[in-house]
Image: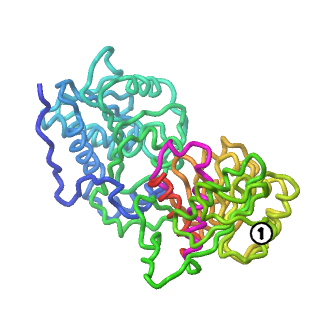
Amino acid sequence: MSPPGRLVHPDPYAPMPVAPSTLVSPSLFMAADCRTIDRDWANAHPAISLMERAGAAAAELAGRLANESGEPVLILAGPGNNGGDALVAARLLAKQGFRVEVVSCADPACLPQDAEQAWGAWRESGGTVLTDIPPARRYSLIVDGLFGVGLQRDISGEDARWIAQANGMRCPKLALDVPSGLDSDNGRICGSALRADHTLTFIGLKPGLYTADGPDYAGQLHLDTLGIDPAALPATPGIALTQRESRHQLPARRQNSHKGQYGHIAILGGVGGMVGACLIAGRAALQQGAGRVTLGLLDERVVVDYLEPRLMFAVPENLLAQNPDVLAIGPGLGQQPRAYMLLKIALAAPCPLLLDADALNLLASHPELASQAARRSAPTLLTPHPGEAARLLGVSVTEIQANRIGAACNLSAKFKAHATLKGAGTVIAHPDGRYAINTSGGPWLAQAGSGDRLTGMAAALLGQGMAAGDALEAAVWLHGILT
């Protein structure tokens, strides 16, 4: 048995869902932003229900995603507006001929006004509500409308059991706004979460879909603005790096140019046993177009890279005296007294400075170096992974991962630097309060040397004249695309 035909979106003013990857730097909205948008819309347009539009968009996408088994669509409806969206979708799917089963333990008398109306409309259309998922039942699709943005507690009890049951079923799963149990602000799992194949998010994108556990639970993302003009939405400090803007791209090189116009990059590190980190960074800088790259290795036995003979080598102290255009320090640096002194000198350099790896660990363990870093007038870039970020902020890795955006912004503010918190959904925070979450890359970047390559790429873009914050964003995005 084949499912009914594709639903037609009933509101001609509401656009169809789009893939966020087709948008350029779309804004990211926190739960508080979403509540403000909902309230302002209701005040300005009392006759137009965003819940009806959201449910219609959900029903249209659900009709396309349901497999052809002919089994019913399971709707999980929670006690809030997310559940109301799901009930609207249930009513419209049933109207089009889909068999629909709604499961909910919500009390209709305690629902928000719009959700109460959606509940009533479902009942009036002849729909019924089950209090539990029938055992051993098979479905063509599961629509998750249990919990949306702004979840304030860990999921437990019946809701957690339903999520576990849904996760164990082999049919497609569509989450509305965010997968239930995923914190829409930071990507943290609240006790348990539905692992969706698709997530249809409404009005605007949520940061939690892109960082921490979000990418593993959201599946393929779809955005429906519900007919709200994006230009009318409130300004937010966050964007998703889905594509490169013009500010992330270097101008075409003139034919009549020379290597001196594309930056001299100095990279310091490479103590005995960790020379490879500096070599990787140096090679990446050349591949990204740096005019010339000199490595200041603490292991001075290494004087040539036979795989990349264009790399130059110098005694670290002598290299610092050459006044390079960009200085990167940290890959394989170690934390011995000589490394400390080199970092102290580097922090006084008048050029853009990128701090990575052991340079960050030295900042964390020596408050005088951290204070010196925060006083720099030239641009400073930090590229920590969660462990290094935890040491720099004096908290646990768990705390960093529980609020990756907040951690990146705290690092940026503390050191007056452009800070990248690496990981799933790398966060780039800037001293003016802006932040971006990268959408390129994947788990293949989780290997030794990946961060060293990013260091070289960012340094190269800086050396070719890109602004510090733009260079860091561009390098992170390219790193995910090219690695």
Instruction: From this view, report whether residue 101 is shown above or below residue 146.
Output: above
The foreground one among 80 and 402 is: 402
Its colouring scheme is rainbow
Task: State the residue position of label 1.
Answer: 347
Q: Residue at x 54, y 74 (%)?
A: 466
Look at the image and give the residue range highlighted in magenta. Answer: 437-465
Compared across the picture, whether 358 is left or right of 164 comes to: right
Q: Quadrant of residue 81?
A: top left
Residue at the top extreme, as displayed: 136
Q: Give, as a three-letter code, the residue at label 1.
A: Leu
Percent coordinates x, y for residue 433 in the rendering: 59, 67
Reply yes or no: does residue 476 show up in magenta. no
Quadrant in which the N terminus is drawn: top left
Instruction: From this view, report whether residue 273 is shown above or below residue 471.
Output: above
Percent coordinates x, y for residue 383 in the rendering: 64, 57
Q: Is residue 406 visible?
A: no
Q: Is residue 171 visible?
A: yes
Instruction: From this view, report whether residue 301 is shown above or below residue 187.
Output: below
Density class for disc 1 (Cα within 10 Å; few <14, some 14-19, many ≥20) is many
Reply yes or no: does residue 455 show up in magenta. yes
Residue at the bottom extreme, as displayed: 256
Percent coordinates x, y for residue 107 in the rendering: 38, 32
Q: Quadrant of residue 283?
A: bottom right
Number of numbered tags placed on the structure image? 1
Percent coordinates x, y for residue 11 in the rendering: 18, 55
Question: Which element carries disc 1, helix, strand or loop?
Answer: helix
The foreground one among 436 and 164 is: 436
